[in-house]
Amino acid sequence: MTTMASETSTEWISVEPTEAELNPHAHRRRQRRIERSAAIAVPLAALALWQLAGEVGWLDDNFFPAPTKIAASWWDMIQNGVFWDSLVASTRRIVLGYLIGTTSAVILGLIIGSTKTLRAALEPTIAALYTVPKLAILPLLLLIFGLGETSKVLLVALTCFFIVLINTIDSVSSVPKSYLDVGESCGTGHLATLRHIILPAALPQILTGMRLASGLAVIVIVGAEFVAADTGLGFLVWNSWNLGIPEYMYVGIISISILGVTASALVRGLERIAMPWRRGS
């Protein structure tokens, strides 16, 4: 218990320490359990309400089949291999495009962000190209590379490239000059300055751009598979709609959502590995 006295009065006020102050580790663990429980309870409650609405006839089964019916169709698709073929095709395109786009963007971003003249010359062009909807480029890619995998992988790569490039340039150019002055006073070379000063300072924003790019990669590949693929989760959704099989369509939609969440979680895991000094926060 802590006692406090007012400057204008001799009256003492008792202040009881909170649970978070007495046992901060136990308090944080309890908060995490509550947050995780809520995160699980909300979708489960939504599914239960959806199931109930379907059973009592509040929802048209032709448009909103019950979750149990969707789950049964999902299991059938797993057994006959249709689901795995779709998932693997979309995942392969996303991973290849993401790696190509983000790797090239980080390298170029570090170079452009570190050179003021180069940044001034290229930033307007980069900003103009970034605003072009990437799905609008798909017909051009199909015209050049055909209907194969190359056009879809490049579409994902271009989508990831610009958002990571802009974040990298901005983060590198925003490194405080005092950091660079410290490195210069210690006699560090260009590579050492890049590795030990610029990159750690810019890394949080670079990884933020990579996390945003992971979600956009999922979105753009689905759009591409709607019109230029014969396999993949996007094709699964589109083809199921054409065939009038809503259960399969919902399987594709849910799978796309799970794929996006998984991609974001993987990048967050990379953040924890690449920036161990931020784990406590």
Image: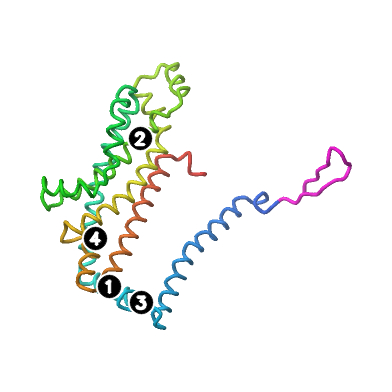
Q: Which residue is mark 1?
A: 246
Disc 3 element: loop
Tell me, for residue 66, which label it has, or none: 3
Residue 196 falls in image quadrant: top left
Q: Badge 2: how crowded within 10 Å, few (<14), some, or many (20+)?
A: many
The first of marks 1 and 4 along the sequence is: 4
- Identify which amino acid the numbered label 1 is placed on: Pro
Q: Nearer the viewer, residue 55 or 186?
A: 55
In the rendering, at what x and y percent does residue 267 appear?
Answer: 36, 47
Marks 4 and 3, the one that precedes in the sequence:
3
Query: In the picture, residue 86 is in which quadrant?
Result: bottom left
Name the residue nearer the viewer: 188 or 138: 138
- Report the magenta residues as a range: 1-17
State how far apart marks 1 and 2 are (Cα).
42 Å
Mark nearer the N terminus (2 vs 4) = 2
CB under 8 Å between discs 4 and 3 = no
